[in-house]
Amino acid sequence: MQYHPKLSRVFKIQRKNERLSFIKNYVTKLRKEDKGVIKRAKNRFQNEWRKIEQQAFTALSEVMEIPWPKQKKHIKVFLSVNPVCPRFLESWEFTIFYKFNINQIKEVILHECCHFLYFKKWKLIFPKSQSKTFETPHIEWHLSEIMAPIILNDPKIRRFLKHRVLFHTRYYKIKIKNVSAAKYFSLLYSRHKVKGSSFDNFLKSAYSEIKKYSNKFKE
């Protein structure tokens, strides 16, 4: 409720249909009131992203060692009043929150594009994988959420951002061999980089490791 404190009223509404109606009316009113703000945000985001788009896609390809798909030259991004920013793997689409600042927008775009390319890479390495495992609560989904910050913090990607990308809070709380899951897999990535190991080998190693401790990731 950080961005939408008025929505907290929904928790006091008992009936489901009334809750849905309240949310719908709130969103409809907000989109109408902030129409100009949303339009200006769209133009600003587009202009800033276009400055780094091609270099960023090239960098993601280099880090994950997979060419950017020729049929995916365009990715649809929808401006939204929802700060959660869901993504849709099959269509390579996602939403971004209209009140984010430029650096937040760059991180969200890089994060979601990372996911799209990451799972394409995953299917090449693990061709028998089922797409349903790319979503919560599967261990493959957890690994993807850990991998995204690791990849975005690689120097080739980090140069597009002004800050270090953080992991989801849960991955700092989960402990593996007395360190957080975030640090455990970050160190694994660093060791592979030092050895000059391929991204394929790193991903295979990371998958093997997370399966050993899968019980720690159960929600």
Image (cartoon, helix red, strand yellow):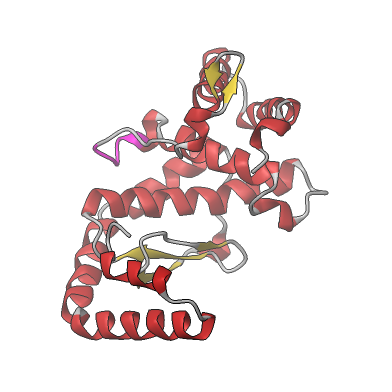
| Nearer-the-camera pick, 41 or 169 | 169
Q: Residue at x 78, y 49 (%)?
A: 129
Q: Which residues are magenta?
A: 158-162
> Looking at the picture, how far across and down is residue 48, in whole percent?
22, 57
47 shown above or below 115: below
Q: Position of residue 110 (x, y in %)?
A: 40, 49
Residue most toward the right? 128
Q: What's the residue at 56%, 25% (across, down)? A: 185
Q: Quadrant of the C terminus?
A: top right
Looking at the rendering, which quadrant does residue 8 occupy? bottom left
Residue 118 lies in magenta, yes or no?
no
Q: Is the stretch drawn in magenta largely helix, strand or loop?
A: loop
Quadrant where the N terminus lies?
bottom left
* x, y percent for residue 155: 37, 29
Is residue 178 shown left or right of residue 149? right
Residues 210 and 1: in front is 1
Determine whether, in the image, residue 197 is placed left or right of residue 12: right
Give the answer, above or below, for where 3 lies relative to 209.
Answer: below
Residue 40 % position (x, y): 17, 73
**Residue 100 seen:** yes
Q: Is residue 207 visible?
A: no
Residue 28 drawn above or below residue 133: below
